[in-house]
Image: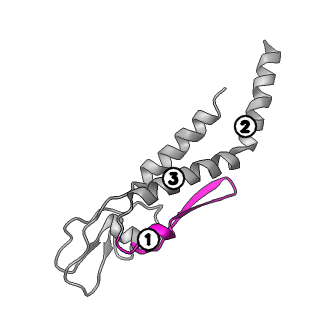
Amino acid sequence: MATDFLSALSEFGDRVSNVDNYLLSIGGQLAEQLKTDVPVDTGALRNSIQVVQQDNTLRIEMLVYGMFQNYGVAGTESAFGVEEVPSIVTPPPMMSNTYQYKQRRFGIPAQNWFDVNALRDAVFNEIENRLEF
């Protein structure tokens, strides 16, 4: 019994050391999903989306206006359709927990084409599934 546990523990250690490979695979899947879901006008935003894997982490990169499209930007007269920006999103809002124009009357409504918390959860779940004994 103890031998089985030690063997399983050794295999688990090998799987954990390969987490970079898992992240690379998961990152590719995330990038493809984001590129499928992004609103497209010129294609510049879609073409800018990439998922960078480094040091056991994943980072999603895109043109900054992708965040403004996703969460919306409040105008000076209206905050209609503007979503709260999670604290892990870059760039963070300057004045509150939402993006806001300082001198533009009307804003940009949120298009909600991705959910950063759902993306994070999907990565965690996928890693957990791949690391099961």
Identify the image quadrant of the C terminus: top right
- Along the polypeptide, which appears first: circle 2 or circle 1? 2
**Residue 108 figure quarter:** bottom left
Q: CA distance from mark 2 to mark 1?
A: 35 Å
Residue 6 in the image: x percent, y percent?
80, 23
Q: Which mark is residue 45?
A: 1
Which residue lies at the image location 48% right of the left edge and 45% below the top edge? Answer: 121
Q: Which mark is residue 131?
A: none
Which residue lies at the image location 47% right of the left edge and 73% below the top edge? Answer: 63
SS assignment at label 3: helix
* Residue 11 falls left or right of residue 121: right
Does residue 97 appear in the picture of this structure? no
Q: Residues within 10 Å of mark 3 (few under 14, many from 20)?
A: some
Identify the image quadrant of the N terminus: top right
SS assignment at label 2: helix
- Along the polypeptide, which appears first: circle 3 or circle 1? 3
Q: Badges 3 and 2: C-beta atoms under 8 Å apart? A: no
Residue 112 in the image: x percent, y percent?
32, 59
- Along the polypeptide, which appears first: circle 3 or circle 2? 2
Residue 37 in the image: x percent, y percent?
38, 57
Residue 40 in the image: x percent, y percent?
36, 68
4, above or below 19, in the image: above
Count of marks overlaid on the render:
3
Q: Which mark is residue 15?
A: 2
Residue 123 part of the magenta segment: no
* Residue 130 falls left or right of residue 1: left
Residue in the foreground of this view, choosing between 46 and 106: 46
Q: Which residues are magenta?
A: 41-65
Name the residue type under label 3. Leu
Residue in the foreground of this view, choosing between 96 and 129: 129
User: Which residue is disc 3 drawn over?
Assistant: 30
